[in-house]
Amino acid sequence: MNKKKLFSIILTFAIVGLLILSGPTQAVQMSINTQKDVYSLKNQVIFTMEINIENSERVPLQNLNLHITHNNNDIKKCLFNLTGDPISGCSNIEITPLAIGQRGSLGFGNNLGTGFGNNGSGLETATTNFGYGYGYNQGKLKYEIKWRLKDENNLEEGAYEANLEAFAKLDNKEFTYLTKDKASFIIGKNKENGKPKNGNFEITDPNMNKILQKIEGLNDGWNITSIVFGDELPGEWNVKNPNIKTNFNFFEINVNEDTTNGNYNIFFSILKSELGGISPNDIKLYVYEDNEWAGLPTTIIDSTTDPIQFSAKATHFSKFLIGEKESPSTTNQGNSGGGSSGGNFILTSPTVLTSVPFAYPDCRTDSDCRDGNVCKNTRTSYYKQCVPKEQQFIIRNKQNIPAKTSEPQLRDKITGLSTSDQTIKSNPLISIIVALIVLGLIIGTILFINLKKPKNPPYVQTF
C-alpha cells in the first residue's frame, strides 16, 4: 500500500478516535458565580448567571430557577421566566437581565440540545432531541441576581451553595439543564477545627480555603480553631474599628495553648475581582494586639494566579484582618505646605502626585456603578471609573485603543467550525480536535493534488 495513503488512513482513524473519546460537546453551557466568597448578614449576595447556546442547537427553554442550599437543605427556589419576571419563591430577590436581547432568535425547527443536566433518572451530559417546534438558537442569556440577606428571617451562618437550573420542554419531551460547578459562598462566618500535622494546619473547608489556606510553625498536639468572616467587623468582637483604607476579610485563629513569642506563617489569598484597582503590593495582614490593629510583615507568593497568594509572619494568634495598607506617599503629603493631604491619589506625571477623594464615578467593581454602567480601567486614575456599557474604547496612555471583545469567536476559514473560548475552556480536547482536522484536510489536499498530477513522459530529443 502507498505510504502516503497509509498515513492518511491512520490520521483519519486518530481523529475519529479522539472525537469518540471526548464525548458529546456541551453546546448548552451554563455558569453561576458570586462576586465575593464571604457575606455578612447585612450584605446582599450578588450572583451572575449565564446561559450560552451554540449556533448548532435549538433549545425550547421555558423557565429558569435559582436553587440555594445550606447543609443540603433547600433555602431558596426562585423560579423566573426568561425575561427575568419572578414566578414563585423569589422573596427578597431582585433579578436584572443583562443580555436578554442576545438570547437568540425564537424560531421553528428541530430542537436539539446537548448539555449537563437531569434527564429524570440521573445527572449526565446528554443530547436531547425535543422534536420540531419553537426554540431558541445561537445566543446568550445573562442575569444579575441580588439576594437581600438582611430581609431574611432566621438565616443560619455557614457555607451555602447555589445552582442555576434551566427547564426545557417541548410536547412530552423535557430536560433540566444544570450548572456543573455550583457557586459556593459563606454567610456570616464559617469555622473549622483540627490538629496540626507535621507542624502545619491546612484549611480543608472549600469555602474557607478560598481565603485562608494554611498555618505553619505549630505544635502537633495543639487544638486549632479557625473562623472566617466577611469584610465587616464582626459584631461579636469587642475591638476597635480598623483605621485602614479597605477591609477584605476578618478571621480568627484560636489555640488551646499559649502561642506568644512564636514564629508562625499564615497563608491567605484575595480574588483579583475583589482587588479591583488595588495593587497586591498594598495588601497587608493586620493583627489585633494591645487594643490596636498592627500590620504584619506580608509577602506576595504569586500574583499571577487568581486568587493572588500571600503569606504573613505572626508571633501569636488573635483576631486578624486582610486589608489595604496606607501608602507612605499619601500620609506624608503636604508637610512643607501646611498640613497633611492623606487620602487617595492619581499619578499625573512621573514625579507629581495629586490628592483626590475616592468618589463616584471612581469604582473597583461593577457593583459600585449606577444606571447599568460598568467599571473600566481608564488608565488616567488610580481607580477604575464607571463608563457606559456600550463604550468600546478604553484610554491607554492618552491613545484610543479598541477594547477586547468579551466573547471572542474563532472562525476557522477552512473547516467552517465556530468555537467560543468558553467552549474550549470547558473541553480542551476541542482545540486539539479542530487542529487535527485542519491538519488532516491540508495533508489530504496535498496528497490528492500529487496523486492526480499527470506524470510527464521522458524527454526524447529528435533530430
Image: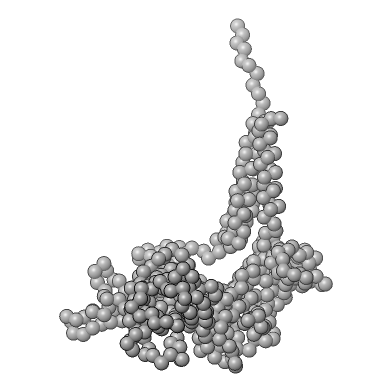
Does residue 25 sit above or below 327 in this rendering?
A: above
Residue 462 vs residue 323, the one in the foreground: 323
Does residue 238 sit above or below 364 in this rendering?
A: below
Q: Is residue 353 visible?
A: yes
Quarter of the figure with residue 270: bottom left
Q: Residue furthest front?
A: 221
The C terminus sits in image quarter: top right
Does residue 309 sit above or below 373 in this rendering?
A: above
Residue 32 vs residue 52, the one in the foreground: 32
Q: Check the image and tell me how it is coloured.
A: one colour
Residue 279 vs residue 339, the one in the foreground: 279
Q: Look at 55% across and 78% down and name the residue there.
A: 185
Percent of width and height locating residue 208: 51, 76
Percent of width and height locating residue 134: 76, 69
Q: Residue furthest top?
A: 463
Q: Is residue 286 visible?
A: no
Quarter of the figure with residue 396: bottom left
Q: Look at 69% across and 67% down and name the residue there.
A: 116
Residue 456 vs residue 62, the one in the foreground: 62
Quarter of the figure with residue 326: bottom left
Total marks in image: 0
In the rendered structure, the answer to whether residue 46 lies left or right of residue 337 reads: right
Percent of width and height locating residue 391: 47, 70
In the rendered structure, the answer to whether residue 134 lies left or right of residue 89 reads: right
Q: Look at 42% across and 71% down and name the residue there.
A: 216
The N terminus sits in image quarter: top right
Q: Residue furthest left?
A: 336
Percent of width and height locating residue 286: 36, 79
In the rendered structure, the answer to whether residue 460 lies left or right of residue 332 reads: right
Q: Look at 26% across and 75% down and name the residue there.
A: 329
